[in-house]
Image (spheres, rainbow, N blue to C red):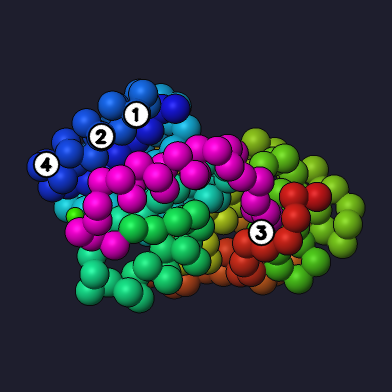
Amino acid sequence: MRVLVTEDEADVRSVIARALERDGHAVSIAGTLEEARRALAAGVDLLVLDLSLPDGSGLTLCREIRATQASLPILILTARTQVELRVEGLDAGADDYLTKPFALPELRARVRALGRRGPISRPFVHVFNGVRLDLAGRRALRDGEQVPVTAREWAILEALANRGGRVMTRVELLENVWGSSSESAGNSLEVLVARLRKKFGPDLIQTLRREGYSLSGSIEGGSS
Ligand code: CA
């Protein structure tokens, strides 16, 4: 299996990497969320993820992955003092956790067990008031009927859904969907948000003055 070990403590990281390599896995390593995102883009079968990383929480990455790449098995590592994070981690879509310090045979066993389960199918449909955004199938339904959306409209919905209901600033959304926060992109955003509100009702996309946008609803249900 291709295993990505994301851990910022170099000695812990290399001990884990060596142990998994001895078990025959192709191991790549990352020390930050940013490095992990790059490594994930190259293709990974299993993620070992420390939760406290220099550029943010592993939980963020967990949620990002669950919003887009539903099946990747994730094993999170938490400090003994972070019990509540462990719960949050499982809520954020992790499959299993290990408390640090852990014994290497335990880690290897957990990785083997997750690997045996293989890709795990998971619901990832964003639901709100009769609106269903099927993030795997890339389609939007309202009251059971498929609603046609353009690629840009979908990109807006997807970017906001990936935030799991949290606010995305206007600039973040522009950079994400247009790759630029120019004035013309900004104008297009206004137009497309208005169009999406016509298609899906006025409350799906919330505008927070001077903050940005968020999507009402939550991820749940099956993928149909
Ligand atoms: Ca750490």
Q: Which residue is drawn at 58% across and 42% down?
A: 117
Secondary structure of residue under mark 4: helix
Residue bearing mark 3: 126
Which residue in the protein does label 2 denote?
19
Question: In front: mark 3 or mark 1?
Answer: 1
**Callout 2: helix, strand or loop?**
helix
Q: What stretch is highlighted in magenta?
A: 99-125
Q: What residue type is labelled 1?
A: Asp
Q: Does the magenta stretch include residue 116?
A: yes
Q: Is residue 38 visible?
A: no
The amino acid beneath tag 2 is Ala
Is 83 drawn above or below residue 72 in the view shown?
below
Residue 43 lies in what quarter of the image? top left
Label 1 Cα crowd, 10 Å radius (few <14 / some 14-19 / many 20+): few
According to the picture, the residue beneath numbered tag 1 turns out to be 23
Q: How far apart are marks 2 and 3 (CA)?
A: 38 Å
Q: Please tell me which of labels 3 and 4 falls first in the chain.
A: 4
Mark 3 or 4: in front is 4
